[in-house]
Image (spheres, grey):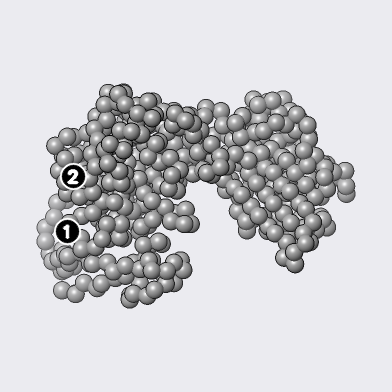
Amino acid sequence: MAKPVTQFVCSECGAVHKKWTGRCESCGAWNTIQEEVPLASGPSKRALGGAKGRRMALTDLASEEAPPPRTLSGMAELDRVLGGGLVPASATLVGGDPGIGKSTLLLQAAAAFAGAGHKVVYVSGEEATAQVRMRAQRLGLGGATVRLAAETNLRDVITTLEAEAPDLVIIDSIQTMWVDTVESAPGSVAQVRASAHELTTFAKRRGTSVILVGHVTKEGQIAGPRVVEHMVDTVLYFEGERGHQFRILRAVKNRFGPADEIGVFEMTGGGLAEVANPSAMFLGDRERPAPGSVVFAGIEGTRPLLVEIQALVAPSGLAQPRRAVVGWDGGRLSMILAVLEARTGIGFAGLDVYLNVAGGIRISEPAADLAVACALLSAREEAGVPPDTVIFGELSLSGALRPVAQAENRLKEAAKLGFTAAMAPKGCKTGDAGGMKLRLLPDLQALVGEVFGAG
């Protein structure tokens, strides 16, 4: 039998090292590498091959099974992100920055589930039960029939849950739980992995839905080994800027529904309020053209979403001009600037460039390329884009515009909000554009000529 090998794992990125070092070679973080005690070794391959196990039941791809049942929470935005409601025997991991509102969201969700007649247990490893009650009273949830506990010993937690048999369990947070069979401190890679495994196994065994709260690193990723995200069925990120009242709940993994679905909430004095029409909330006053301001018609999951993209171009007194981006990828901005200069002859050398996505939302789809390029040109030339126009399309390095998916849904959402015109790449399947005036452009030169009257 081979002797178990001790590993050293980075608590920031989960990279495995053969020996301890002060700095992780994968992510560059200091003092994050921890020793991981190996699990007890199992039987050898020869023993597994010779032993008789239980024969599996095999099916084929043509077999039909009923879809998993759903439990509605009463919070429409949360149900949307989950794919239509919470699935029994599922494990969900929720991550977000400290103070962004994860505990508030889950306490409101727990009260909503309890109000629908389901048995809910809320286990806090970071706060005392009195603190949770005080938050519930501030949110107006003091009368909710949610069972509370403050505990970090996972053995006691599992024993209690076995006796209570709840429909929903919320663990806040997974980094505070510790298993007494693992010889490492709470929050370490081994503890987080073991705790997640035990809770996920409990969920599958007892048919209970489990929601785990996870801390995030400075890069915005859920702390701990990536294997934790593979263990659970759904991974949600709660995003938002501290200076904005909007919060975005985004599904990055969902075995029971679409990924990249979002739910929009507004932080108020009484907790998180759902935003049923986020496009109208993300758009500002658009009665007159404003240089550098355009409206992008995007798709988040299955939801069309209109947001305002703002650009500012100003002379720079620095040897290296600034390039500041909020809500978009900085590397993609550099690519757009290079394509604009190479294909249209309009340069940005010696100019500071600032780009912002209004409302605190973050855009990741390449369909925003054309809107960003239009905002940059508008800001540089001080030429306002008509306020009743939406823009979307992907930009290639050759300067050609590439069509994007779900163009018809983007246009219908824009028409619903009163927009009458749209600029999009030639070749988009627009279908019924809702009576909008379409300007289908083949390349960047056509964009410059159409909007700014230049060749």
Which quadrant of the structure image shows residue 65?
Answer: top left
- In this view, the residue in front, 365 or 270, is 270
Depicted 254 relative to depicted 197: above or below: above
Secondary structure beneath dot 1 equals loop
- In this view, the residue in front, 72 or 327, is 327
| Mark 2 in CB contact with mark 1 (< 8 angstroms) | no
Circle 1 is placed at which residue position? 181
- In this view, the residue in front, 139 or 370, is 139
Depicted 275 relative to depicted 368: above or below: above
Specify the label residue 158 is tagged with: 2
Residue at x 35%, y 72% (from the top left corner): 17
Which quadrant of the structure image shows residue 413?
Answer: top right
Residue 308 seen in the current view: yes
Looking at the rendered structure, the kind of residue marked 1 is Thr
Residue at x 16%, y 40% (from the top left corner): 160
Could you tell me how many numbered marks the image carries?
2
Disc on the earlier residue, 2 or 1: 2
Residue at x 70%, y 36% (from the top left corner): 390
Q: Is residue 165 left or right of residue 333?
A: left
Q: Is residue 283 left or right of residue 220?
A: right
Residue 431 seen in the current view: no
Secondary structure beneath dot 2 equals helix
Specify the label residue 19 is tagged with: none
Looking at the rendered structure, the kind of residue marked 2 is Ile
Q: Residues within 10 Å of mark 1 (few under 14, many from 20)?
A: few
